Image: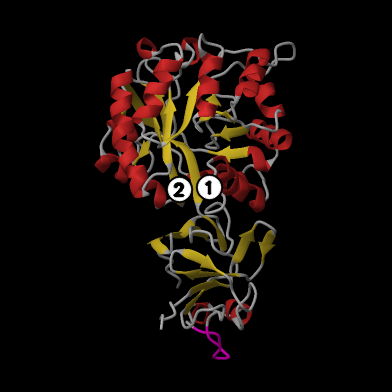
Amino acid sequence: MVAHKAVQVLAGARVVLPTGVVEGGAVAVDGRTIAPYAGGLTPPGAADRTSHGAADRTSPRPEDGTSAPRAGVEGGAILSLPGDHWIVPGFVDIHVHGGGGASFSAGSAEQALKAVATHRRHGTTTTVASTVTGDLDSLAQQASALSELVEQGDLAGIHFEGPFIARNRCGAHEPSLLRDPDPADVRKLVDAARGAAMMMTLAPELPGGLESVRLLADQGVVAAVGHTDGSYEATLRAIDAGATVATHLFNAMPPLAHRAPGPIAALLEDERVTVELINDGVHLHPAVLGLAFHRAGASRVAFVTDAMSAAGKGDGRYRLGGMEVEVADGVARLVDGGSIAGSTLTLDRAFRRAVTVDGLPVAQVVEAVSAAPARLLGAYDRIGSLEPGKDADLVVLDGDFRPVGVMRKGKWVVSPELS
């Protein structure tokens, strides 16, 4: 006889589901996955408990004595959350270089895990590790090391940002290491990742660009247009060749102009493209962010951090690849030249800003930090929304949209402490 597993039920908060926001809802967690709840979204007595004071909110069971869900499981504890809290899916970051003083480009498992842990505490339960421009042998070594963490489940994949980018739009990438996207070189990096290559950013207008986009698409690797000086027409050709992502749209590419719409218009208008946005208040004006949401729709927007090692750490001197970076007041810039060098953003801050500053509906923000990037990774059957059978990846936000609880695969990374 197989023993039933105890189920955790998080109840009383606003739950953001694919179908909308449920007031006083509940999420049941059965081991590593989200479980169906036999009584519906709200356990018996949950609404009563959350309408009372703090003492009632921490009560382990409903006042009428009924137990946790009855959907093929028995027992379990109910964690009652305040009614102004939110339960949302775990965040998915497809473009991040590091955090907590650690960098994915170090090619060190210890540093990679430190960066992952930093962002997990801020709600990112799925991380794609991004490298930065280097020589091919060094990038291949980094990919090999990171691929082991992908195999272990600590990372969701590897994103190569550079070296196949435009010199005129290189940003914080070392100009001397840039090169054209020769398909043979592109294939070398993909092979070095041993099946863990998830995405590669390149400038498709460069020699070999379109051939490389086709190669990536054939290999099941996302081809992303970024750090590009290409025209509107060149970008359309890249999309037709298989490119499906705009790397940090608006940044490191020609601006939108009325006679030369450039890559921005092409990437925004094509339904096949997911656009990354860095919502830190530095990279984008709120009006520009609103424009992207209005034109592309929330289902095609993926919030990313593009965070470097200073995220979660503080001001000071850091390195991004081979470049020295000064972080002051949370803004990262190259010491030599002053270009913005990634960010110090975490996705919880991007979420909070989107709601409180940009005025976006919570459901749209959840789409951008969870569902859209999960679909892009081909992982929406497991992550990206709160639905039965999916991984129990979730974030509990307080009434000010600050994370007070983070769960990954049914285990608390940050456990809610309710007074």
Q: Which residue is mark 1?
A: 379
Name the image quarter holding residue 186.
top left
Q: Which residue is mark 2?
A: 126
Of the 4 image quadrants, the one containing the C terminus is bottom left
Determine whether 190 is above or below 383 in the image.
above
Q: Is residue 300 left or right of residue 399?
A: right
User: In x, y percent, where is residue 105?
Assistant: 32, 30
Residue 33 can be seen, yes or no? yes
How many numbered discs?
Answer: 2
User: In x, y percent, where is residue 357?
Assistant: 62, 43
Assess disc 2: are there few (<14), some (14-19) or many (≥20) residues with their C-alpha within 10 Å of its C-alpha: many
Question: Which residue is located at x 56 percent, y 53 percent?
Answer: 381
The magenta region covers 61-67
User: In x, y percent, where is residue 387?
Assistant: 59, 61
Viewer-proximal residue, 86 or 338? 86
Determine whether 199 is above or below 236 in the image.
below
Amino acid at pointer 2:
Thr
Question: Which residue is located at x 37 percent, y 43 percent?
Answer: 150
Viewer-proximal residue, 249 or 231? 231
Most extreme residue toward the front is 1
Q: Is residue 267 left or right of residue 214?
A: right
Question: Which residue is located at x 45 percent, y 19 percent?
Answer: 171
| Residue 174 sits inside the magenta stretch | no
Amino acid at pointer 1:
Ala
Determine whether 96 is above or below 182 in the image.
below
Mark found first going from the N terminus, 1 or 2: 2
Q: Are marks 1 and 2 in contact (CB under 8 Å)?
A: yes
